[in-house]
Image (cartoon, rainbow, N blue to C red):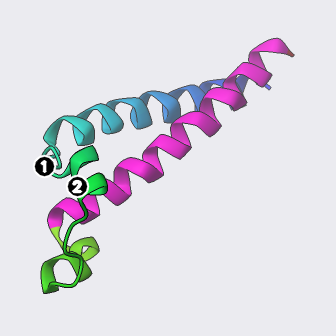
């Protein structure tokens, strides 16, 4: 059980550092809440293919690492209670 704690802890640190780096290199989305209220044109080519751009990939990996962060945090919490 000790080995599992250390493996998950190392993975947790790697995910934490990666999440910090990805979050800091992303651009701020300009539309924000005002774009939601006022409505924005989602019919152009860029908006339809946004997931294929560099920013789209960064956003996707940030979400994936965020979920991994939460799962590993819960796993570590359970392992250290036992």
Counting from the top left corner in percent of width and height, residue 26 is at 17, 45
The N terminus sits in image quarter: top right
Q: Is residue 74 magenta?
A: yes
Disc 2: which residue: 35
Task: Name the residue that disc number 1 marks.
Answer: 30
Name the side, left or right, on which 25 lies relative to 20: left
The relative height of residue 81 versus residue 66 in the rendered view (above or below) is: above
Instruction: Please report the residue visible at 28 percent of the width from the left and 72 percent of the height from the top.
Output: 51
Q: Up-down: is 58 above or below 72?
A: below
How crowded pointer 1 is (Cα within 10 Å; few <14, some 14-19, many 20+) is rated as few
Q: Nearer the viewer, residue 43 or 74?
A: 43
- Taking the view exactly as shown, the residue that stands out farthest to the front is 38
The answer to whether any part of residue 49 appears in the image is no
Q: How far is the residue under mark 1 from the one under mark 2?
A: 8 Å
Magenta region, residue range: 54-81
Q: Residue furthest right?
A: 82
Q: Position of residue 13 (x, y in %)?
A: 44, 27
Question: Of label 1 and label 2, which has the lower sequence position?
Answer: 1
The kind of secondary structure element at disc 2 is helix
Q: Which label belongs to residue 42?
A: none
Mostly what secondary structure, the magenta segment?
A: helix
Q: Secondary structure at mark 1?
A: loop
Image x and y of residue 4, in percent: 71, 31
* Disc 1 + disc 2, Cβ < 8 Å: yes
Give the tally of numbered discs.
Answer: 2
The residue under the point 18% across, 35% down is: 24
């Amino acid at each position: 059980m000790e080995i599992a704690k250390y493996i998950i802890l190392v993975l947790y640190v790697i995910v934490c550092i990666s999440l910090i780096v990805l979050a800091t290199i992303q651009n701020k989305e300009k539309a924000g809440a005002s774009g939601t209220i006022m409505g924005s044109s989602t019919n152009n080519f860029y908006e339809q293919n946004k997931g294929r751009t560099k920013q789209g990939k960064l956003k996707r990996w940030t979400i994936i690492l965020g979920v991994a962060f939460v799962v590993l945090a819960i796993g570590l919490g359970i392992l250290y209670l036992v």
